[in-house]
Amino acid sequence: METESKGTRSGGEQIKQEKMWPSLKENMKYLNDELGVGENYDIVYRVVQVGGREACIYFIDGFCKDEIMQKLLQLFMAMKPEEMPDNAHEMSKKNIPYVEVDLQTDWEKIIYFIMSGIFALFIDGYEQCLLIDSRTYPARSVSEPEKDKSLRGSKDGFVETLVSNTALIRRRIRSTDLRMEIFSAGEASKTDIVLCYMAARVDHDFLEELKAKIQRIQVDALTMNQESLAECLFDKKWFNPFPKFKFTERPDTASAQILEGDIVILVDNSPSAMITPTSIFDIVEEADDYYFPPITGSYLRLTRLLIAILTYFVTPTFLLLMAHSDWIPINFQFISVKETMNLPLIWQFLILELAIDGLRLAAVNTPSMLSTPLSIMAALVLGEFSVKSGWFNSEVMLYMAFVAIAGYTQPNYELSYALKFMRILNLILTQLFGIYGYIAAIIVFVIAIVSNKTVSGKSYVYPLIPFNPKQLCKRLLRYRLPHSEKQ
């Protein structure tokens, strides 16, 4: 063979073998060193006889299906010498009754497949490794996501297994136009990434750009799965809090976005899909908008949009009006604070903003059996007791309760926090500069949305900018198009 075995040159530089040898002993010695067989208890190898030839199998304990492996070993060990083909190619075609069988000679790919859970068979005299994909991953059952629930929609959701997620999409889009390309990223993790798109509807320029970005990723591992990938794909303007991607755990939502020409990115070990490119109108949409009749879906969508706007304006506007009580109309004088304020309003709002996040974190980390006592304590401490103690005024508690509850109407977690950050900025500027700070904060809010770009570089607020009235109506209202009109 022209390739060199693993060793060192005179200068101390390590040489890495690229292709496997026909000798089983050399292959085993190299692979045992690379995989650390003696140190890793879950990397299993076994020497067997296949048709009178010495052979060795390698696999990861817990990744292979025991029943299939047992039947294959029985078949291999029952083969007679006269039944043995001369090469691995004929062996894979005639003597292995299994669907997913591949041949490989490159050591880097062989090791990658073994570490992915594939069953590898080396036979003395063969210059190719037989890779049998009999793997199975520990996975939970397909169930409705806790976050993306729907009243009428399907009750299945993505799981942490990549093959199951692609199957859920294939079940909904039975078209030969659907493409699913796989990539890997991370020097150590080698995390699988799948791009799902419709070949005839996708923006191919953006698709090629996205592929190039994934292939250029130079990281040790995608530690946080999709968030790590998102930061690698879009590393500009990190200070803009508005989300660049839409995340969903619903296969029906992901399939609908694929049919609209978007690209869905699935990452192994992640139970959600990334949708790109996405605008602000895509992010505020929800599955229930389409599972109800057009008039109901339109009402739900407009209500969600109105509530999102109110969560931003309610507390800063109240703070401004309390500083200029003469601006309040006579019919709305009841909104004024009647009781004594022991703390300035700005500090009450900021403390409650922090306290609400503290309750969210506590709810996430609280065992389910203690969630009810936690809710009762939170209602008492942040409700009646906090007002009676003099820390907060009842009007402040009312408006912050509305803001906290309304934040959960947004299906996108990042969007609710983007509105929160902008609201806090408005509160601070309003307190410092009055009406000028209030207006300046609104200008910053508008600029942050308008100047934001999708991952493809297009407008984040299209069809508002550039203005397209027909598409804007489709974004704001849920109505049924005539069958003759193309989507």
Image (spheres, grey):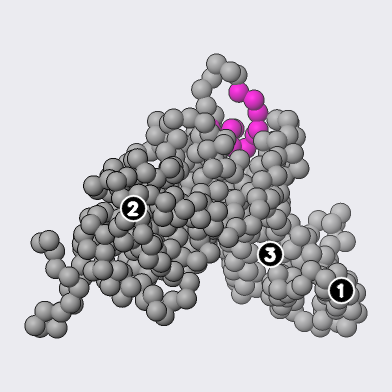
Is 196 inside the magenta-drawn segment?
Answer: no
Q: Which residue is mark 1?
A: 373
Amino acid type at image mark 1: Pro
Q: Is residue 365 left or right of residue 55?
A: right
Badge 1 element: helix
State which quadrant residue 408 falls in.
Answer: bottom right
Q: Amino acid at mark 2?
A: Gly
Report the magenta residues as a range: 471-481
Task: Please tell me which residue is depicted at 24% across the width and 55% down the height of the picture.
Answer: 126
- 283 on left or right of 78: right
Circle 3: residue type: Pro
Residue 316's disc number: 3
Q: Is residue 452 visible?
A: no
Name the quarter where the N terminus is drawn.
Answer: bottom left
Q: Closer to the camera, 206 or 25? A: 25
> With respect to residue 476, does 335 lie above or below?
below
* Most distant residue in the top direction: 484
* Residue indicated by mark 2: 51
Mark 3 crowd level (few <14, some 14–19, many ≥20, 10 Å Cα):
many
Query: Which mark is first along the chain, 2 or 1?
Result: 2
